[in-house]
Image (tube, grey):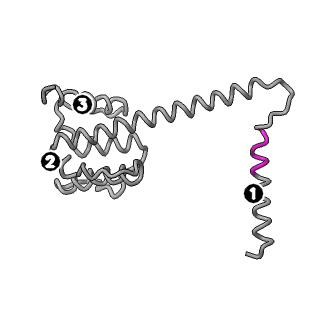
Amino acid sequence: MGTQEGERDWVDVANDLLSKCHINLRLRKLTDCDANVFISLYENILGEKVPDYIAVPCSQEDDIHNVQSVIDSLSLDYLQISLSHITGENVVRGDKESINNLLEIFDGLLEYLKEEISEESQNGEDLNDSLNEDAPGEPKETANCDATDNKEAELDGASSSSSGE
């Protein structure tokens, strides 16, 4: 595959991610993937602010810092894997391989989170279906979960107060 075709594919991936995240931005070339793109993807996909974020970047060093904060947080807080092969400096300077790698991570992360949400909602529907299948008037065992939890909490509180701690 030629480099122009490969770049086009990654621009499509980037634009697809931006679209799925409802970020009103469209890229024409891979090097348009700047700090703002990755910060927006991070905040939209993960639903939180980038740690140690410089809100008004005044220099390329500030952009490098912000992208590196995105990479470090993904590595340490979410993926628990080394992303040392991707640096904020290379991304901001337009290194296509680094940009591709970071786009690939966001694409995979978004897919993973969508699957998790889908499974959770499916499990919730399964639970509701099983509750609705019980005969009317019969007590539902799952309805007592909160009461059981409260009893255990009371017992825990009583045992720690009686032990003199």
Work out whether mark 1 precedes mark 3 in sequence or the reverse, and give the earlier one. 3
Give 40 or 71, whichever is nearer the viewer. Answer: 71
In the image, the segment drawn in magenta is: 143-149
- For the residue marked with disc 3, what is the amino acid? Arg
SS label for mark 3: loop
Which residue lies under the disc numbered 3? 26
- For the residue marked with disc 1, what is the amino acid? Ala
Which residue lies under the disc numbered 2? 93
* Residue appearing at x 20%, y 46% in the figure: 91
* Residue appearing at x 28%, y 38% in the figure: 103
Disc number placed over residue 95 in the picture, else none: none
Magenta: main secondary structure equals helix
Residue 86 vertical placement versus 96 (above, below): below
In the image, which is nearer the foreground, mark 1 or mark 3? 1
Q: Split into 4 quadrants, where in the image is the N terminus? A: top left
Q: Is residue 54 left or right of residue 163?
A: left
Tell me the distance, in whole angstroms, between the alpha carbons under discs 1 and 2: 55 Å
Disc number placed over residue 153 in the picture, else none: 1
Work out whether mark 3 precedes mark 2 in sequence or the reverse, and give the earlier one. 3
Residue 133 vertical placement versus 142 (above, below): above
- Residues tagged 1 and 2 counted as in contact (Cβ below 8 A): no
